């Protein structure tokens, strides 16, 4: 796929300086690019490369004043760095739209229903009665269990595993290795100290526009559904236990863990490695700092919390300051003791 | 597979009210069910649906008094909700027993020995000299390394990866993406600051009736075995390092990490995100609260611990209370200082 | 593959006692070994097995004095235990060198370039324009995205997933289920409370001699590269966020998380479950204890830190001691109050 300087200038709203028909087929760093690539110059430190680069097209800042003649065609934009990023991103989109079709070997049950313009990479497994929407992309090794329903424009990266009977909304992105719908951690203790498994017969519902990172785990509900509402974003290696409900537009950083039946509100921000107790609620707009242990419900919305057990941010900061003043406090007590000792001695003598 | 109201009533010990020959082939919610499905009514709030539902069979509470005539056949039970759950669970069992055979493409080494009535999904990989027991189910993308031995009635979910020479007992369940038998984290520092890998030539032994969640990692021993004893249950995203030994009927919640050569006793409960130092022991019956950092051995059995470094629960609670009383203590010191100041001033004046 | 006692003695620098032509094809425990296996005796407690074992060759300590005649051929070495380990390790190397070829079914894009003597297991996926060096081993289910470059002598274990355009150096080992190059966690908040995805167009660079554990996640940079420098070792379930840079010969234990754009120095040791804030630096030679929360840059090299927020080890130990002395401090305040009370009462009476 080739693009001309004129086409690219249109895509990034720039001005061509040189040959508008100059054409490239890929991206390169200015110091390494070949004749069929486009490069950019943002940092003036590397300006010398502009005059030596083999790239046919180079994106530069509007403000740049040339010190020598340049063989490449230039595209001038307000910010060369971000224009290059936008271009890369648009290119990825175009490439991705061209990824269509079913690679072999793949396993697609006869009772599965597939939408239009989907891409199924080799080694994907689509179970019985699965429904997949339009423009869905399944990267290599994706496994979709029986009866699961996937919306439109969903991207499941390599090795994503979704168990049976789950529901995935539209425009959901799930990164590699994430597991959706594994059994919740439910066991009933028996008299002899052993445990009996409680069947986990619910499912997981992930609503529209949710993005989930790599190697995260979201367990199916014991009964009913574990739900992640519209627009929420989860990072890598997060644990979402059975029957958890996460509100809309909530953001959870890596390695956080939400225990069973906890209910996280809308617009919440949860830092990395946070843990919550089960069966609690976290009010809308709460901000939980990294490594916090939330042991009780947070009922007042829009407050910041940290520490284990979690406290509101201001009282926790005051407590930290006091803890840090412990050596000073101990010294003050010692001095008081000395003074009293002296007073008592004086009194006896007196 | 169709079931009649009479058959279902037998399975959940209920009483048929209507046509015992009414038959269904699947499950539905009362408000959405079609004529070939069974539904249930538990919450009286939804009673109106009972009279409108298209479901051919509906499970209801014994106590329910009908306010209108119902077209569906009813099955009355003490608790409709749990009867429905039991039915679903029995149905899953029946369906799962029917999952037998080897799907293509799969890769099974010629020297592997396979038991009877096993299910091997597409894209599973069974290495050289692997031994697999009877009634084992391998979901898509399971990888079993050379020489590993798997017992009877084991379920390995999608993408479970077991390295070479490991031993898995009977009735073990391992959820998607979990890795068993990866190299322990062992490196010897060299004089130039770099590290040399210590070969990890041991294995992992997982005994009968153990269940392990999704994306957990259990490393092989440097020499000898990392062992998880009978009946223990591990949640998702847990780290079990090399040469760890976990007792029987011990329960470990998500994202906990057990460091190398630690020895966890029987009947222990470990909360989410707990971390332990290496080479320590945790006595039988210990209860470790979430996010605790166990830095030393816990030698007295049946005690509760929390905090980092871990303390017995009562002393840790007292410490938390005292920490919270710091502002009060500081105030008391200030007042003492004032009084003494006054006393001294009086004395000088006196 | 058979080895004689003479050959084995050469490999472990031992002395043969018995028939140098005695040959074995595998390893066994002394109490279970069959005639075609080699075993070892290290612990004198098990010496009786020496006289009963069916093993054809047994490795023993130089110092051992026989109490009966032995049918097996002996190989005497200074330390039988470590000699057996070395032998196993050398054997694994030989076996592994014999793993060569491409198993079917696998998916290798036509534009991929493969080095010599590589092993590609069944169900591996090699994308467009991927470059793979010599002596590389891909275990089952490895996925390599378009344009990624892999050096020589690399081992990628089962189910490793590397996204597009990443760079992996020589002699890198990555364990099962690890994900390299997933999108960084970058979202721009919009006025309506929802989030818009920031394209992650950078990559991941992993330099020579790095080893990474199982189910770890290393995100690609927003722009530029997430970099792990030469010789560093990462354990299981670690999170490395976008644009992080990790120095040379740095060791990170399981479940640690390094936030976006943090820069970890050379020769750093990071304990399990440590978390760091984003955009900080950690100086060369720092030692960070398990579960520490590093909230600010650590600028002085070669210091130990722990706690959340992280403190230098000595001040943190002093603080812990003081916190533990809180009950004592409270008592001292109470006594001071009593004494003063008495003094004041005396004064009034006086």
Image (tube, coloured by chain):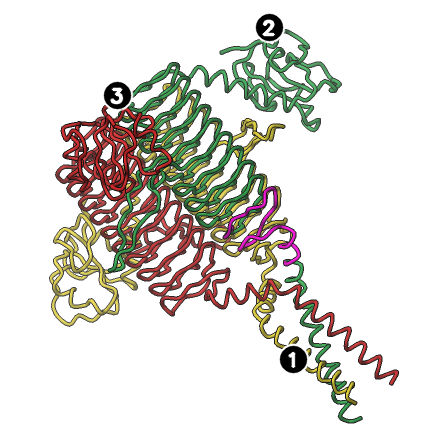
Chain colours: A yellow, B green, C red
Do we see residue B188 in this rendering? Answer: yes
* Residues drawn in magenta: B294-319
Both marks 1 and 2 on one chain: no
Left or right: residue C125 versus residue A125 is left
Question: Which mark, residue B21?
Answer: 2
Chain letter of the residue beneath label 1 in the structure image: A
Determine contact: label 2, label 3, CB under 8 Å.
no
Distance between the Cα atoms at labels 2 and 3?
Answer: 50 Å
Total labels: the figure holds: 3
Observer-side mark, 1 or 2, equals: 1
Residue B28 sits in which quadrant? top right
| Image coordinates for residue C284, horizontal then vertical, percent | 33, 64
For mark 1, what is the residue? A335
Both marks 2 and 3 on one chain: yes
Question: Which mark, residue B150?
Answer: none
Question: Which mark, residue B111?
Answer: 3
Distance between the Cα atoms at labels 3 and 1?
Answer: 81 Å
| Image coordinates for residue C40, horizontal then vertical, percent | 28, 34
Q: Residue at x 63, y 6 (%)?
A: B20
Do we see residue C193 in this rendering? Answer: no
Chain letter of the residue beneath label 2 in the structure image: B
Left or right: residue B5 versus residue C312 is right
Q: Quadrant of the C terminus of chain A?
A: bottom right
């Amino acid at each position: 796929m080739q693009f001309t300087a004129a086409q690219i200038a249109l895509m990034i709203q720039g001005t061509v300086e040189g040959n508008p028909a100059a054409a490239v087929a890929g991206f390169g760093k200015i110091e390494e690019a070949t004749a069929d690539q486009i490069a950019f110059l943002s940092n003036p430190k590397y300006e010398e490369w502009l005059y030596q680069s083999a790239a046919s097209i180079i994106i530069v800042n509007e403000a740049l004043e040339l010190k020598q003649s340049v063989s490449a065609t230039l595209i001038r934009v307000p910010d060369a760095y971000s224009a290059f990023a936008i271009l890369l991103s648009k290119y990825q989109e175009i490439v991705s739209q061209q990824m269509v079709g079913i690679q072999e070997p793949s396993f697609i049950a006869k009772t599965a229903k597939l939408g239009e313009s989907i891409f199924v990479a080799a080694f994907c497994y689509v179970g019985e009665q699965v429904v997949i929407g339009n423009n869905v992309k399944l990267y290599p090794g994706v496994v979709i269990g029986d009866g699961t329903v996937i919306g439109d424009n969903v991207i499941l990266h390599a090795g994503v595993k979704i168990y049976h009977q789950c529901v995935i909304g539209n425009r959901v992105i799930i990164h590699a290795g994430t597991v959706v719908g594994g059994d919740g951690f439910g066991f009933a203790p028996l008299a002899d100290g052993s445990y009996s498994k409680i069947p986990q017969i619910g499912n997981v519902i992930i609503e529209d526009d949710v993005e989930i990172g790599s190697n995260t785990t979201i367990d199916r509900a014991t009964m009913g559904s574990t739900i992640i509402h519209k627009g929420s974003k989860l990072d890598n290696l997060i644990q979402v236990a059975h029957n958890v409900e996460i509100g809309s537009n909530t953001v959870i950083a890596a390695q956080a863990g939400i225990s069973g039946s906890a209910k996280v509100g809308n617009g919440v921000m949860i830092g990395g490695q946070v843990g919550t107790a089960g069966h609690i609620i976290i009010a809308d707009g709460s901000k939980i700092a990294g490594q916090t242990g939330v042991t009780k419900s947070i009922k007042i919305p829009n407050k910041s919390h940290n520490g284990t057990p979690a406290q509101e941010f201001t009282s926790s900061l005051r407590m930290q300051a006091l803890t840090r003043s412990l050596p000073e406090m101990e010294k003050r007590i010692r001095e008081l003791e000395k003074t009293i000792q002296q007073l008592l001695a004086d009194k006896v003598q007196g």
